[in-house]
Image (tube, rainbow, N blue to C red):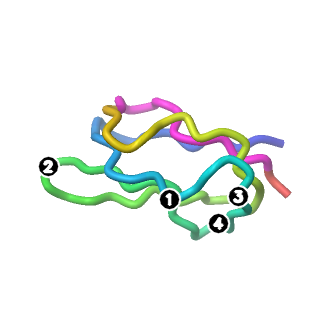
């Protein structure tokens, strides 16, 4: 089963901390978003393997945009 990690706000991608194929746990940080001079970590929320990273550092994202997809298990 796949878990989609989406942006919860309008922001810029400050950094991407994972790559496709990486194993992640539920509290691992995938991406750091930057908004209004704040850095917001985006967590995996599930354990699994990163299937897709849909953003790169410097990208702008809107609320609901896909940041990454994780294959659970």
Q: Position of residue 63 (x, y in %)?
A: 38, 32
Badge 4 vs badge 3, beta-carbon distance below 8 Å: no
Q: Earlier in the sequence, mark 2 or mark 3?
A: 3
Given this view, does label 2 or label 1 mark the residue nearer the observer?
A: 1
Give the residue displayed 51% in from the left and 39% down from the top. Answer: 67
Q: Position of residue 11 (x, y in %)?
A: 28, 40
Give the residue displayed 50% in from the left and 59% down from the top. Answer: 17
Q: Secondary structure at mark 1?
A: loop
Badge 1 vs badge 3, beta-carbon distance below 8 Å: no
Say which quarter of the image contains residue 18: bottom right
Residue count near mark 4 (Cα–Cα under 10 Å), binned few <14, some 14–19, many ≥20: few
Q: Secondary structure at mark 4?
A: loop
Q: Earlier in the sequence, mark 1 or mark 3?
A: 1
* First to last magenta residue range: 61-71
Residue at which label 2 appears: 36
What secondary structure is the stretch in magenta mostly built from? strand
Residue count near mark 3 (Cα–Cα under 10 Å), binned few <14, some 14–19, many ≥20: few
Q: Secondary structure at mark 3?
A: loop
Give the residue displayed 45% in from the left and 53% down from the top. Answer: 31
Residue at which label 3 appears: 22
Residue at which label 4 appears: 26
Give the number of the disc on residue 69. Answer: none
- Quadrant where the N terminus sits is top right
Q: Marks 4 and 3, Cα distance to the nearest angstrom? A: 13 Å
Badge 4 vs badge 2, beta-carbon distance below 8 Å: no
Residue at which label 1 appears: 17
Q: Position of residue 51 (x, y in %)?
A: 73, 42
Give the camera-side residue of 43 and 12: 12
Q: Marks 1 and 3, Cα distance to the nearest angstrom? A: 10 Å
Give the camera-side residue of 63 and 11: 11
Q: Secondary structure at mark 2?
A: loop
């Amino acid at each position: 089963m796949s878990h989609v990690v989406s942006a919860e706000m309008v922001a810029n991608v400050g950094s991407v901390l994972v790559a496709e194929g990486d194993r992640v746990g539920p509290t691992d940080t995938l991406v750091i978003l930057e908004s209004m001079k704040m850095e917001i970590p985006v967590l995996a929320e599930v354990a699994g393997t990163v299937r897709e990273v849909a953003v790169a550092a410097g990208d702008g994202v809107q609320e609901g945009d896909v940041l990454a997809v994780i294959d659970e298990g």
